[in-house]
Amino acid sequence: MIELQGVTKTYRKGRVEVPALRGVDLCIEEGEHVALVGPSGAGKSTLLYLIGLMEEPTSGSVRLFGEETARLTDAERSRLRGRTIGFVFQAFNLVPQLKAWQNVALPLHYQRRPRREQRERALAMLERVGLADRAEHYPSELSGGEEQRVAIARAMVIEPRLILADEPTGNLDRASGRVVLELLETAVEGGATLVIVTHDPEVAARAGRVVRVVDGRVARG
Amino acid sequence: MKLRSALSLASTSLVAALLIVSLASYERALRRLDWLTEVAGRNVLLIRIGEGGGNLAPLGSDFLAFVSNLEGLVRVASQVQGGRRPNAFDYYTLYVSENYFQVRGFRFVAGRPPQPGRDEAVVGFGLRDLMGRKLVVKGTRVRVVGVLESMSDRGWPDAPLDQVVFLADRGVLGPTTYYLEFESERAARAALVPVRRWLREHSREGYRVQPLASLYGLDLRRKLRDVLAGAISWGVSAIVLVAGANLATFQLARALERIRVLGIRRAVGASRQDVLREALVSATLWALLGLTLGLPLAYALAGWFGARTGLDARPTPVAFASTALGLLFLVLASAYLPARWAADQPPAGAARGMAASLPQKRLGLALASLALGMAALVVQLGVSRSADEHTRKLVGNLSSNTAVYSSFFFVGSRSLTDPRGVVPLDHGDYAALLASPLAAELRAHAYVEAYGVPLGGPAGKTYTYVRAYEGAYPELAGARLIAGRWPRPGDNEAAIGQELAERLFGSTDVLGLELPALGRRWKLVGVYAGAGEALPGNAASDQLLLLREDLGATLPRARGEILVEKNPRAPKEIFAAIGRFLTARHASPELAPVEPFTVNDLAPEVRAVLLELTAAYRLLAAVILLLAGAGLAAQTAMIAELETRTLGIRRAVGASRGRLLFELLMPLLQASLLAGALGAGAGVLVSYWVVRAQGATWAFPWASLTFIVLAAPLLAALAAALPAWRAVRRPPAEAMRME
Ligand SMILES: Nc1ncnc2c1ncn2[C@@H]1O[C@H](COP(=O)(O)OP(=O)(O)OP(=O)(O)O)[C@@H](O)[C@H]1O
Ligand SMILES: [Mg+2]
């Protein structure tokens, strides 16, 4: 359901060109749990952003759910992202001006769901991640682990087909990390596909498949 | 967050209020100027007794029959001066035809016109208490059946009518004035020649015909209107520019600040349209809120203006509507472009937190806004100052320390406008004044006699005034030498106005040439630039100045004028005292007292508009600076907030509060000094360009400029201090937690 063929990505800053990906071929099936590992700067995050339609490849094709994404307009890409893909970042990336429940409800807001439904579903999701009592708090009033659980609630509130997590446990202690990971794995049990970038061998070990990214390429084995 | 929002909301509503107030005063000022050109009676010819004597009997039915055949004639009205009995209390009376009030455009505030054949009267506004009462006028009992509106706003030619009793024409003999109303201004002007010819052919040259409007200085009013309208519209544009710059930078900074958040929103499925829509909706709400707060603020501001300058700036519906539209457009436009830019960034980069490197650019934006604001302010200063200067050039150079005693508007012992006679001033009066103790209070004085004469040169002929002066006349009358020198006694020397030189010789390169006038040849030793319009107390650019001493004596038909400038410390009452002194020399109950013309008496109705507006501009300029300050404060607040985390880090590694404050404010101070200077420089250039493009004289208040350039960084520091202090004071631990 995710098919990448000959994908390259080169960042350009003035005259300097940084090749982040140098030709990636990758297939991920529906319901798979994949860990992306590799040295720092190898291009893992870049790969994740490309799969999540957060940016466009310099060349090559990204097919998602059987669709060639290069053909999609911005509105269609946004719609796809908003309804089927849940993102979890290492740096949480909550909106500081919004309360916890409003952060969780944000994707529903862009699906134009009624406000009541937004709030109910967000609160239910917060309950599932164990933060029912922090719904009215702002991100700056939460601990890192709590923030990441809010971010996971935001990713899962849309019942995504695909969850993309970029070092979700990187900033957390072992216990909080485990909670976060378990939350993500429940989603996989529910049938979602999970792609998780990690430096933690323990986290990688729990994945169904491990993909190594080295120097902008997928290394076999 | 809250402080910044409050500041930018405050500046938005201040913008709204400023726009409303300036548009409203613009609208009212223009309306008043239009009205002044309207009431001048542009399509009316005035026929009245002029110089030269001859048969002064009324023109009679032959004339009326001739006139009725003129093309485009609508009505003829007439007025006979009833005069005033000497040595007894009496009213000034005018016998007027039935349609007089209609032709003159005089409205009634009460009652109706007198009916012919009845003993009825109408009174001027100053006598409104007499309404309904019976009077004895010229031995006849009349009943007052109507009161006219006040004429004082219409300008000096009509002002005396406020004290006049109007009676229905009953065939009384006396100096008669005719008003011929035509369909259009063109028809009126076209009739000038045939009427003149008729008067000549019937040997009635004692009567002179002229457009009624010329009495009011219609051309002057028009010119002033154009100059003022130009100045005002530039003032308004300056405000719009400052407002726009402020709003745009605010929105841009907001978009930059939000780019990370936008990235997050895009990650959870917001499309570019969603992001744009959100930005526009919030901007619209912002504009509406600013407008809502701006309206009461505008009323308050207008009240303040009114109390300080007498300018009526109360919001008008048009001003409010245009402001609403303009503000909405400004806010939306300035929100849309940056939002669009932010939305176009790939969400991945935003989510990675790339926006973190942008605070420097934000500071640049705030400074650009300051520079723009400064430029706009300086343009406005330059333009309004030039308008003032240009107006002064048009009407003469009277300062508030000068007064003119003139018999210029009077022919013989008859005023052209005042039903009373007036004192014909002469050289004896001047000599007597200088010999009196009053002279001690004067810093400068001059006497001048004007002679209306035809002049001719190789390039053309013209009819103008030769002015024979004594004393500091060129200085007091505001004539500036542009070539040569002023005449010296004994050699029949003269200085020629540059416009007259152009007309007679086709160039201003006329030094050493000779010009015949008043029966001799005058050697041109100087060329001067003077007023554009001949008025009492000025030397116009189309006249010839020479020394009265060379003339030897007063020639027939001289019109004397005495100009004085009082010592700066002498009281204003000195002007009235001189008037009484001159009146006493000609003691005659039939003559009106000699009144001083001061700066406010010259085209007072138009000048009043200018003076009020100049005062208003000064206030507006101050408010604009305030606005620029508010914008800067909002920007600083934003920068300080964005830097909060960095500040926390700096504090964590050991920086003191004072040190941080210094680090925050110092570059701002330097940069705003630079931005202010650059903006001011640009403003000076633009104002020069604008003023020259309108063909007006450029002038600039340099002192204010220095003040402003120095005030800008001070303002920046002040504006920045509060938010910076707030950011610095925050405990580092809390700061580190801020996103
Ligand atoms: N916006 C950008 N402009 C220029 N270069 C970039 C940009 N974003 C990423 N890069 C470069 O692309 C390369 C791949 O970056 P990427 O973030 O994908 O690495 P990564 O594998 O996720 O590393 P890490 O494990 O440290 O997060 C790096 O060399 C990085 O410097
Ligand atoms: Mg990474």
Image: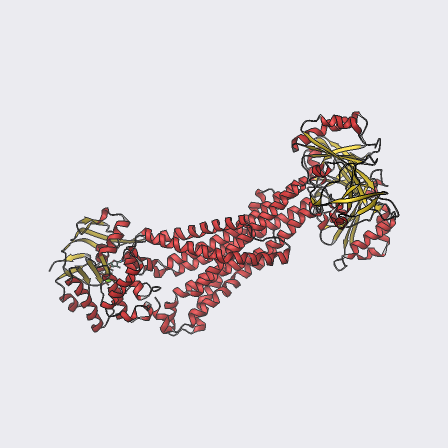
Q: Nearer the viewer, residue B141 or A192?
A: B141
B344 lies above or below A136:
above
Q: Residue at x 23, y 51 (%)?
A: A57
Q: Which is more toward the observer, B161 or B275?
A: B161
- Residue B114 x %, y %: 75, 40
- Is residue B49 or residue B620 the one in the foreground? B49
Within the image, what quadrant is residue B198 found in? top right
Where residue A207 appears, x then y in whole percent?
14, 64
Q: Residue furthest left?
A: A221
Q: Is residue B578 visible?
A: yes
| Ligand 2 found in image quarter | bottom left
Asked whether, in this view, residue B631 is left or right of residue B472, the answer is left
The vertical placement of B63 against B561, above or below, is: above
Instruction: Report the colour scheme.
Output: secondary structure
Res. B671 visible in picture? no
Task: Name the residue nearer the viewer: B346 or B526.
Answer: B346
- Side of B401 relative to A193 (left or right): right
Q: Quadrant of the C terminus of chain A?
A: bottom left
From the viewer's perspective, is residue B695 above or below residue A23? above
**Count of marks, rendered view:** 0
- The spot of residue B197 in percent (x, y) is 75, 26
Left/right of residue A167 with respect to residue B356 in the rendered view = left
The spot of residue B543 in percent (x, y) is 73, 39
